[in-house]
Image: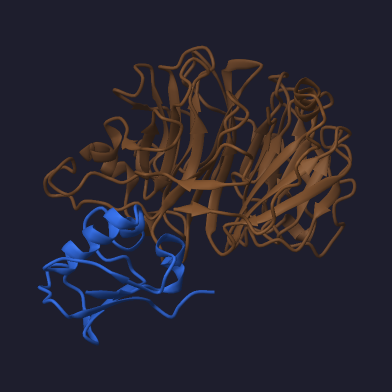
Chain colours: A brown, B blue
Amino acid sequence: MTHTPRKKAARKPASEPQAKRTARAARRGLLLVATRKGAWLFHGDSARRSWRADGPHFLGHIVHHLVLDPRDGRTLLAAAKTGHLGPTLFRSTDLGRRWKESSRPPAFARAGEGAPSGLPGRAVDHIFWLTPGHASEPGVWYAGTSPQGLFRSEDGGQTWAPFSMINDDPRYRAWMGTVQDGTPDGPKLHSIIVDPRDPAHLYFAMSGGGVHESTDAGKSFAPLVQGMEVVPGFDPSDITFHDPHCVRICPGNPDRLYQQNHCGIYRLDRPSSQWVRIGKSMPRRVGDVGFTMVVHPRDEDTAWVLPMDATSVWPRTSPGGRPSVYATRNGGRTWQRQDAGLPSGQAWWTVKRQAMSADARDPVGLYFGTTGGEVWASRDEGARWGCIARHLPEIYALETAEPA
Amino acid sequence: MKVLIPTPLLSYTGQREVDAHGASLAEVLADLDRRYPGLRFRIVDEQDRLRGQMRFFVNGEQCFDLAQPLARGDSVQIVQALSGG
């Protein structure tokens, strides 16, 4: 199926030389916003002050993730479904002017053809997470689904196949639990990470089901949950009970990972396998629970979180209706509140795990999309915030990109 | 036979009513997918289960079994359940 957005993006003048166009585009930011009712692209100027909305794309579709391939700066993948129609992926190579559906979207093995005997065959409900492959493997992409599944494409997202042993491994199936164990709209596989130094070194996380690592290109995975806490009363040695919300690797030091978990904020410095809870130094009245985790593109000691209210019945709103980003500049030893420009009260939204990102500029730009359909941006690493879009549907994901 | 297509799938077929061939619902779906690639997976999952909000009617009768035999001249209607928000 092909899909055309409602409004076409404005074309640049044909008279402008290609090299100049390319250089200018490289300085401009692009935000990829996926929502419960469609997707939008926001094209920024070189100062990151003004943003032009391009959309909706796929109006009415539930879009869980929209990602631009950093290796070619052209290939855009959108994970979509509707409330009725099954999950699929759309692909564009011209920044969303035209979309083409994957000819073979992610799908589990049929019962009896991969699923272990005695366990029912599963069906992908939605594609939740997209990760471009290693720089040395152009065309390779990974996808994480709900219920938890891992898939791989080797042709730029046109066709997909189940990847690795985990989808149909009885032990992993047990760790994944049932739909009742997962998040309200289904348990998810997310945070698929490719070590920038080694395409065979992979991580992923499951809500629920823990963090996992492979050093053999996905032939095998092993849990990586030591030090991670679980809800009091449950056994932390049972992988099922671990609920990482978002895991990020530091581009400036791929031996360091940060994690926002259902039970706190963590840091891991390899080769150690011991996660350290760094959220204990967050203010007690705010706590250290949230969905998203953002790392600095160069400085391994700098990371950002956006806490939510995890008290009583877990409202999952901003604590006290006063949203704030928190930043650490020392690997989690201390945290600073960054709420300048954000609403000072009666703002009850939160930010989902894929809905906050950093760009690679200096100073770093930070961006997040809220459950209330607003996009907020900071050009100075969180020191001051401004709202750049309002009235969008509930935002599920926000990625930054640099088009070619 | 004639197959009536719900509006969410018009982006595949381009028309509300299409022709398809097959001796069962499963065969008709396979035929539709050949003509309109990707359509089948949006309404039937990889375990051959009808997706939760999709329904088939054959000659006006609701049908849940993809193996249901069909005869020449039968009419098939694909319907999206009235739900959502």
In terms of depth relative to the viewer, which is nearer, A184 or A218?
Answer: A218
In the rendered view, would you say A13 is above or below B8?
Answer: above
| Percent position of residue A394, x then y | 64, 60
Q: Is residue A397 above or below residue A6?
A: above
Residue A170 lies, in percent from the top left, at: 21, 39
How far across and how far down the image is residue B76, in percent?
A: 25, 77
Q: Nearer the viewer, residue A381 or A217?
A: A217
- Residue B45 visible in the shown view: no
> Residue A367: in sight, yes or no?
yes
What residue sits 85% from the left and 37% below the top?
A: A45
For this view, does B35 lie left or right of residue A335? left
> Residue at the spot x=42%, y=70% of the render?
B15
Residue A316, by quadrant, is bottom right
Based on the displayed image, in which of its 4 quarters is residue B58 positioned? bottom left
* Location of residue A121 with respect to B22 vertically, above or below: above
**Tag count:** 0
Q: Nearer the viewer, residue B67 or A131?
A: B67
Q: Is residue A272 left or right of residue A7?
A: left
Q: Residue furthest bottom?
A: B60
Q: Quadrant of the C terminus of chain A?
A: top right
Q: Residue at x 53, y 47 (%)?
A: A99
Q: Is residue B72 left or right of residue A191?
A: left
- Residue A253, given in percent of the width and then of the height, sits at 62, 15
A255 and A88: which one is in front?
Answer: A88
